Image (tube, rainbow, N blue to C red):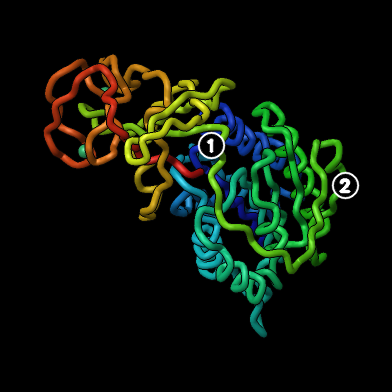
């Protein structure tokens, strides 16, 4: 039996935290349920899930539909699209059966790439490798979610870029339904080359994007409507994410070197989410994290992992962690003992800022 390999390449950067990630997980279960009720799909479809943030990881190896269980998705910092493509190509080299003179290989693979951010690495070389290799032998549909996704990079990757501008978690289900329908229709017409039929994309709330193919890939930027700070529980050594939204009112900040006051928008604490340990691994090795002045961030949540009331203490190493109250505490990031006062010091402090 020739297989129809389907790869999901899913952006699990920190901007997906909370409801969006949950909807994506639910969506995968939905795809599997719908496909299983389709005898054509049941006969041919094999599914694989690759997740990427600052690093990429195969979450589920290519598995036949009947055996596939929708996985729990990890979360990480960053959106390393180049690294994700390299990982996907290795995975496809390893698992997709090619035709030989005496044996038919798998049907043309389908890849669904979903991303909601701008690449935090330079994906240029990986895009060239994809276009010269698997890009000719597989079909990719790239779906950008939300208004911040980098369409220029996606358009260089595939002629099938669908933009889904609503960032509402509930709407992700529509997109997922469309994916499931297009897999079903492909499983009924295996052997056809090219992208899956694009019917119903408008009903799913998406539009097709075409941009000049020679468009430059813009430099990675940080979405500055939110600031995301990764804290680490000093007791349990587990990460958590603090999300701050840019507020309407600005704040006066004194620059000590220049001795002048300048104005900047303030970010108010919006939410805190506990993260699993795998966050560190999924964030990859990238240094040079963009930073934000901690003075702009207002509010401190309690630690979501332990009883500490203050989740936003900042060590001199720049790492954020939890603390029970004023006094001494060992920083879980650098291991140094520091003495903390509750009032925010007037010195300029910067903390590592998430990029995804
Ligand atoms: Zn804690
Ligand atoms: Zn430290």
Residue at the spot x=38%, y=30% of the render?
Answer: 254
With respect to residue 271, does 118 lie above or below?
below
Nearest-to-viewer mark from 2 and 1: 1
In the rendered image, the residue lying farthest to the bottom is 101
**192 and 204: which is toward the camera:** 204
Residue situated furthest front in the rendering: 259
- Rendered image: mark on residue 199: 2
Pointer 1: residues within 10 angstroms few (<14), some, or many (20+)?
many
Tell me which corner region of the image, top left, top right, bottom left or bottom right, holds residue 138: bottom right
Query: What secondary structure is found at the residue carrying circle 2?
Result: loop
**Residue at 67%, 32% in the rendered image:** 167
Q: Looking at the rendering, in which quadrant would you find the N terminus?
A: bottom right
Quadrant in which residue 36 is drawn? top right
- Circle 2 packing at 10 Å, graded few (<14), some (14-19), many (20+), is few
Disc 1 element = helix
Give the mark, 2 or 1, whose residue is nearer the N terminus: 1
Task: Give percent across and percent down for residue 30.
Answer: 66, 34
Vertical relation: 86 (above or below) 18: below
Residue shown at 18%/17% (left/top)?
326
Residue 84 screen position, x and y as percent: 52, 58
Image quadrant where residue 213 sits: bottom right
Ligand 2's quadrant = top left
User: Which residue bears the numbered disc 1?
Assistant: 15
Query: Residue 208 placed where, x, y %?
Result: 82, 50
- Residue 200 in view here: yes
Cβ of mark 1 under 8 A from ligand 1 = no
């Amino acid at each position: 039996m020739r297989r129809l390999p389907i790869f999901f390449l899913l952006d699990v950067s920190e901007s997906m935290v909370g409801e969006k990630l949950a909807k994506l997980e639910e969506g995968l279960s939905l795809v599997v349920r719908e496909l299983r009720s389709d005898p054509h799909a049941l006969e041919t479809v094999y599914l694989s899930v690759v997740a990427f943030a600052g690093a990429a990881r195969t979450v589920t190896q290519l598995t036949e539909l009947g055996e596939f269980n929708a996985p729990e998705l990890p979360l990480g910092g960053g959106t390393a699209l180049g690294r994700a493509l390299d990982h996907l190509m290795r995975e496809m080299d390893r698992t997709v059966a090619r035709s030989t003179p005496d044996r038919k290989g798998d049907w043309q693979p389908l890849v669904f790439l979903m991303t909601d951010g701008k690449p935090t690495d330079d994906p240029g070389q990986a895009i060239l490798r994809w276009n010269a290799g698997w890009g000719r032998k597989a079909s990719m549909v790239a779906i950008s979610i939300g208004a911040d996704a980098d369409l220029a990079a996606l358009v260089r990757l595939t002629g099938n870029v669908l933009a889904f501008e609503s960032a509402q978690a509930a709407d992700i289900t529509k997109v997922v339904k469309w994916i499931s329908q297009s897999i079903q229709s492909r499983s009924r017409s295996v052997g056809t080359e090219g992208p899956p039929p694009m019917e119903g994309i408008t009903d799913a709330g998406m539009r097709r994007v075409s941009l000049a193919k020679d468009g430059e890939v813009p430099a990675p930027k940080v979405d500055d409507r939110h600031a995301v700070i990764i804290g680490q529980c000093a007791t349990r050594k587990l990460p958590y994410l603090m999300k701050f939204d840019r507020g309407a009112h600005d704040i006066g900040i004194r620059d000590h070197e220049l001795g002048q006051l300048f104005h900047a928008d303030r970010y108010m604490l919006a939410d805190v989410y506990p993260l699993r340990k795998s966050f560190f691994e999924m964030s990859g090795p990238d240094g040079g994290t963009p930073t934000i002045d901690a003075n702009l961030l207002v509010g401190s949540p309690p630690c979501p992992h332990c009883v500490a009331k203050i989740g936003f203490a900042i060590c001199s190493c720049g790492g954020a962690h939890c603390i029970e109250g004023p006094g001494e505490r060992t920083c879980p990031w650098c291991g140094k003992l520091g003495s903390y006062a509750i009032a925010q010091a007037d010195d300029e402090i910067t903390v590592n800022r998430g990029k995804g």
